Image: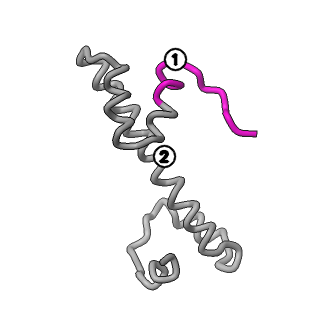
């Protein structure tokens, strides 16, 4: 499936050009590109979650309920939102 996706030539984002220009084509394979795609989606989810939590807080919603509902859409929110709401920003990886 990843090999099929390689055939598509999407319009490239200007923000990726410095990375593309400084990295030789042979330095990364399909796995690396797929990991970059997954990280991009995860970062988008977390950014959107933070925006939603601010909107919910300013609207007076119960953030526990908001977190529970948003977790139904993405398990990543269920792991991340409690840390954000408690102010715990320690890294959780080695």
Q: Give me the residue at 42% from left, 44% from top.
A: 45
Residue highlighted by disc 1: 86
Tell me if mark 2 has few (under 14), some (14-19) or many (20+) residues whose alpha carbon lies within 10 angstroms of its own.
Answer: few
Vertical placement of 68 versus 7: above or below? above
Number of residue marks: 2
Give the extent of the magenta segment.
Answer: 81-94
88 drawn magenta? yes
Q: Name the disc covering residue 62, or none.
A: none
The colour style of the image is one colour
Does 93 sit left or right of 69 as displayed? right
Image spot of residue 2 (x, y percent)? 51, 76
Residue highlighted by disc 2: 43
In depth, the one of 52 and 11 nearer the eye is 52
Residue sitting farthest toward the right: 94
Counting residues from the N terminus, which is met first, the one under dot 2 or under dot 1?
A: 2
Q: Give me the residue at 26% from left, 18% from top.
A: 61
Q: Give me the residue at 51% from left, 57% from top.
A: 38
Q: Give me the residue at 76% from left, 39% from top.
A: 94
Image spot of residue 31 (x, y percent)? 62, 69
């Amino acid at each position: 499936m990843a090999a099929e996706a390689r055939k598509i030539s999407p319009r490239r984002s200007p923000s990726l050009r410095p990375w593309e220009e400084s990295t030789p084509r042979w330095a990364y394979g399909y796995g690396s590109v797929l990991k970059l795609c997954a990280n991009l989606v995860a970062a988008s989810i977390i950014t959107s979650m933070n925006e939603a939590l601010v909107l919910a807080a300013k609207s007076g919603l119960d953030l526990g309920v908001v977190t529970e509902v948003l977790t139904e859409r993405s398990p990543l929110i269920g792991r991340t939102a409690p840390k954000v709401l408690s102010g715990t920003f320690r890294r959780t990886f080695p």
